[in-house]
Amino acid sequence: MKNRDFDPEKYTISIKKIVEYGESLFVAKVAELPDLAEYGDSFEFVRELAINAIQAAYELCSEQGIPFPDPLVDNDLQDVSGRVTLRLPKSVHRQSIKLAEENGVSLNSYLLSCISSHNATDSLHGQIEKLNQIISENTYSKAHSPRKNYFLSVDEAHLMTRSRRMSVATFNNRDESEEVEEEIRGLTKRMHFISGVVR
């Protein structure tokens, strides 16, 4: 999507009134950007904050060469209601309530946050697998090539989630084709961006 075509108002913004710490607030969330949430005293104010945040995130991703999610098409949402009945073991239910209270959010908001973070982590794992495949293919082809003027460098990016820590190795090769180099750079930037969101 080109900058002149970008319209943050096309994104799916949901606004809800909540009570936190005894105060009534409005919270705005964006379906396409599950980690984005804006809080404020009025419906109009949080909507404006959400639109500004979408615009700022788009501009940052554009500057960094990171793909930005397109707005959901109505067809994508027609088959879902936004409501799920979730059966949990009593111990998990009790622990989730306790953690939600410790974080000062409702159980629903806490579970939504957990699911959104897990989905973002899965996306990150997919990007890592794709990058590892490119690295493996190029390492193998270069290792079996008569030309030996290549090198490997390892850049450890510690990607933190609550439950796991991963190290990512990036491949650097003087003889890499432009296309492979560009793909590696793009995937690495995307992984660093997603890791910041998941953290």
Image (cartoon, rainbow, N blue to C red):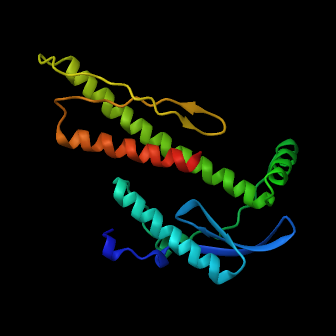
| Residue at the bottom extreme of this rendering | 44
**Residue 163, position in %: x, y?**
66, 35
Q: Nearer the viewer, residue 99 or 155?
A: 155
Q: Nearer the viewer, residue 27 or 83?
A: 27
The image shows residue 8, relative to residue 140, as above or below, that is below
Quarter of the view holding residue 91? top right
| Quarter in which the C terminus is drawn | top right
Q: Position of residue 157 (x, y in %)?
A: 47, 33
Q: Relative to 133, is 116 on the left or the right?
A: right
The image position of residue 169, as x and y in percent, is 40, 29
Front-most of residues 113 and 156:
156
Please state the horizontal and vertical placement of residue 171, each as a whole percent of the image. 31, 29
Q: Considering the image in quadrants, where does the N terminus appear?
A: bottom left
Q: Is residue 12 above or below residue 90?
A: below
Residue 90 occupies quadrant: top right
Using residue 26 as the reference point, say whether residue 104 is left or right of it: right
**Residue name at image x 72 percent, y 77 percent:** 41
The residue lying furthest to the left in this view is 146
Q: Is residue 91 left or right of residue 44?
A: right
Compared to residue 181, the image places residue 105 above or below, namely: below
Looking at the image, residue 17 lies above or below residue 105:
below
| Residue at position x 19%, y 29% in the image | 174
